[in-house]
Image (spheres, grey):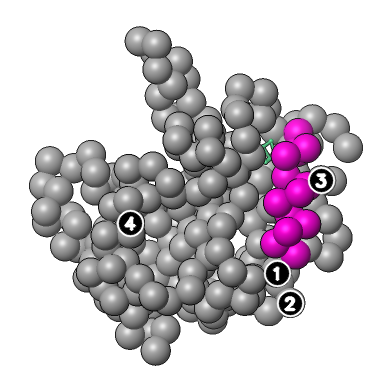
Amino acid sequence: MHEGDGAQAWVPPHPTVPSLHAAVQDCRGCELYRDATHAVMGDGPSGAALMLLGEQPGDREDGEGRPFVGPAGRLLDEALAASGLAEVPAYRTNVVKHFRHERGAGKRIHKTPSTWHVAACEPWLLGELEAVAPTGVVVLGATAGKAILGPSFRVGAQRGRRLEWPADRFALRRPPVWLVATAHPSAVLRSRQRDEDLAALVADLSVVRELIG
Ligand code: SF4
């Protein structure tokens, strides 16, 4: 069990959502824990048919220890409500569990996790996928899309339609069946054409609404 060797040594062997929550705070699989407040494991019911998968916790999530509690989470809630998914039980999580950032002007500024960080943290995500066993996964943005579909993934080219879960990439006992890709809500927040991009996010989530039944 060495810092920088990836998360596998910290992940419990038969993961449940509570056991993952308990174990992740001790993870030293990469250096991101050093300058963060909390590891942020996913949130939602075990057995949820839907998993929403983002990039990493932000400043607010790092402080509270819960995913999607900041401005991007509020926009995601808005989009879920507009697409008819607000009442559908969903497990929300990120591919990386600690907040990667740099300091500037007295603030902590988001920094995209590297491919190495995503790979180091992958055992936690696989543990969540085993424990929750969703039928469908919504990948929010490029980092999540590349984590699942590989480096050639592009949001613009692959968003808004049913894609098959790449079962050969991951050893899961009960893999998801499908996934749908869309933009990350934080990208919509930053956009200069926010109304159009929010409408596109809602349209993609409406596809998910159809698939989930
Ligand atoms: S980012 Fe992931 S692998 Fe790195 S220390 Fe945090 S939980 Fe462990």
Describe residue 106's horizontal placement relative to residue 53 as left or right. Answer: left
The residue stretch that appears in magenta: 16-28
Q: Amino acid at mark 4?
A: Leu
Report the predominant secondary structure element of the magenta stretch.
helix
Q: Is residue 85 visible?
A: yes
Residues under numbered marks 2 and 3 in contact, where contact means CB atoms less than 8 Å apart? no
Q: Is residue 5 above or below residue 148?
A: above
Element under label 2? loop
N-terminal-most mark, 4 or 3: 3
- The residue that mark 4 highlights is 76
Element under label 3? helix
- The residue that mark 1 highlights is 130
Question: Is the CB of mark 3 within 8 Å of ligand 1?
Answer: yes
Location of ligand 1 given as a quarter of the image: top right
Question: Mark 4 and mark 2: span between their CA atoms?
Answer: 30 Å
In depth, the one of 27 and 48 nearer the eye is 48
Element under label 1? helix
Question: Mark 1 and mark 3: span between their CA atoms?
Answer: 16 Å
N-terminal-most mark, 4 or 2: 4
Question: Mark 1 and mark 2: span between their CA atoms?
Answer: 7 Å
Residues under numbered marks 1 and 2 in contact, where contact means CB atoms less than 8 Å apart? yes
Q: For the point 74% across and 77% down, which residue is it? A: 173
Q: Amino acid at mark 3?
A: Trp
Front disc: 1 or 4: 4
Q: For the point 32% across and 43% down, which residue is it? A: 71
- The residue that mark 3 highlights is 10
Question: Is the CB of mark 2 within 8 Å of ligand 1?
Answer: no
